[in-house]
Image (spheres, grey):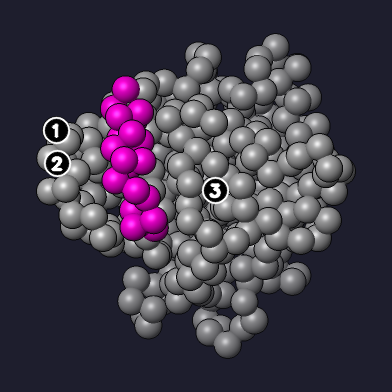
Amino acid sequence: MKICHLAALSLKKTRNMIKKIIKSSASDHFNEQSWSGYPHKMSLSSLLKFGFTESQINGLAYILGGKLILNRSEILEAKCDFRKHYRIKNDPNHPKFDKLLIVNWSDLQAKAQAVADANHVDPLSLVLICYHRLDTSTNSWFISVEICILKDFTAPPNADTYYDIIATGVYVDITTTGLKNTNPGDIGVGTNNIYGRDYFDNIEYSVDSTNFNPLSLNDNVRATLIAWFEIDKMYLHNIDASRDSALFELCFMSMTGDYSGTTNMSNVQFPHTFCVYSRYDDTDLLDDGDIVVNYFQNKAEDYQTLCPPNCKKYFWPAPLKFFLQNL
């Protein structure tokens, strides 16, 4: 996956941005990627001279490093990467199964609000558990989504936090044609091993894009978890007074990237993840402009917790607070 860089940022702006991160998040925790892994024109030494530590600067690199937001070119590259590593079983010439999933904002928001009201919680405390599925009649990917609650969530935390998840039993499918009712039995609801059998029975994975093997329930991604907090910000950053919310849609696109070197983020090198971006009146709200911290406008969201390895908890990284709160 292409990684965005600091070249477009002035040194003064970069310095101020790092100060904000240090003040409002525990960015020292985010040193899993070395600074040398991020293409940039500013040298590390030019930033260190301001008295910031390398791990603090890595906190900024984490936010700008393709883990939270992507522009149009980056998501297209990530989609191409996905097609190199996943395919329909034993049929490499089969048409691509990674069709775009599109859902009307108002429809999904109404479902989320209903769950929040029924459980007397703030909608911003919700989390979507998205199980990978495959419509075998059309060989199209879709997701079965359980709308759950992050336990004891009051405001984005200042430190790395794992939230317990409270199940609600409310499911909905997001498909290539919008929202549909879920048959919970298709994903084993009521058992201790929930996954999309149609997906795992029919998809193969390859690390080297050559040797494909059946998916592993212990390693390959069964579900991705995305906080409603992020979905809400996606909407707020792209809607304005001139736009009718009835014409606002969210798009879910399959993608992957190289997770080697990360800690407890994925059990496979190239996990099946997805990004979410906005569409208005059938027009994608995406551009190739510079990625601006704390803004989803015309960009895609690219952060989820993956199951496995994190199946029963949602991981909130500290810099995510800075990204979502400092509007």
What kind of secondary structure does the magenta stretch mostly adopt? helix
Q: Quadrant of residue 256?
A: bottom left
Q: Is residue 290 left or right of residue 186?
A: left
Q: Position of residue 138 (x, y in %)?
A: 74, 71
Per the image, the residue denoted by label 1 is: 51
* Residue at x-position 26% and y-position 60%: 41
Query: Residue at 68% of width from left, 63% of height from top?
Result: 100
Tell me whether the residue at label 2 lies in contact with that at label 1, contact meaning CB atoms closer than 8 angstroms. Answer: yes
Work out whether residue 202 or residue 242 is closer to the camera in this orientation and state it. Answer: 242
* Residue at image point 48% right, 70% down: 77
Q: Tell me the mark number nearer the camera, choosing from 3 and 1.
A: 1
Going by the numbered disc 3, the residue's amino acid type is Glu
Image height check: is 267 above or below 127? below
SS under mark 2:
helix
Q: Is residue 220 left or right of residue 174?
A: left
Depth check, front residue: 141 or 190? 141
